Image: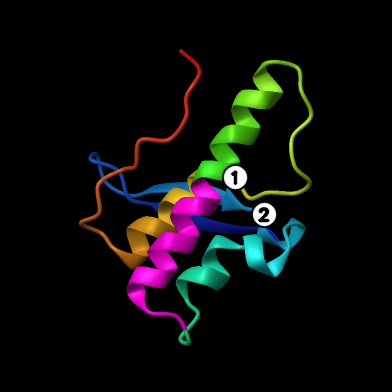
Amino acid sequence: MIETLEIPTPDGPRPVKSTTERVAPASDPWAIATDSSLSRAAKLDRLRRLEFDVRQTLVASEEGMSGKGSLPMLAEVLAAIAHVSPETQRSASPTKS
């Protein structure tokens, strides 16, 4: 299932296509963000770890290495983090320098 999500940006919401049907439930950012059994802190912790994994995989693929199996798009993870905690600052995740 592909749906359109709105990602908050400084210039207003930006629509992106969601493809979360291809990821495992534990890696689905929206499943984590809407899980009523998790506290806000637990959701943010899981989403930040997922963001780290996605960023590591992106860096690895840029360097010609294969990454983990199926992970969500980075934009989906960032949108889920913004949904759970709109005032949260972006994390310092690995980037290629």
Question: Callout 1 environment at 10 Å: few (<14), some (14 to 19), or many (20+)?
Answer: some
Q: Are marks 2 and 1 in contact (CB under 8 Å)?
A: yes
The answer to whether residue 58 is above or below residue 22 is: above
Left or right of 5 on screen, residue 7: left
Amino acid on which the number 1 mark rests in the picture: Met
Which residue appears at 27% of the width and 46% of the height? Answer: 12
**In terms of sequence position, does the residue under pointer 2 or pointer 1 come before the other?**
2
Name the residue type under label 2: Thr
Which residue was labeled with disc 1?
Answer: 73
Question: In this view, which residue lies farthest toward the bottom?
Answer: 37
Which residue is tagged 2? 19
Is residue 6 visible to the viewer in this orientation of the structure? Answer: no
Q: Nearer the viewer, residue 58 or 76?
A: 58
Give the image location of residue 83, x and y in percent: 36, 64
Nearest the eye: 8 or 40? 40
Which quadrant holds residue 65? top right
Residue 11 horizontal/vertical position (percent) = 24, 39
Above/below status of 39 relative to 53? below
* Magenta-tinted stretch: 38-51
Report if residue 63 lies within the magenta region.
Answer: no
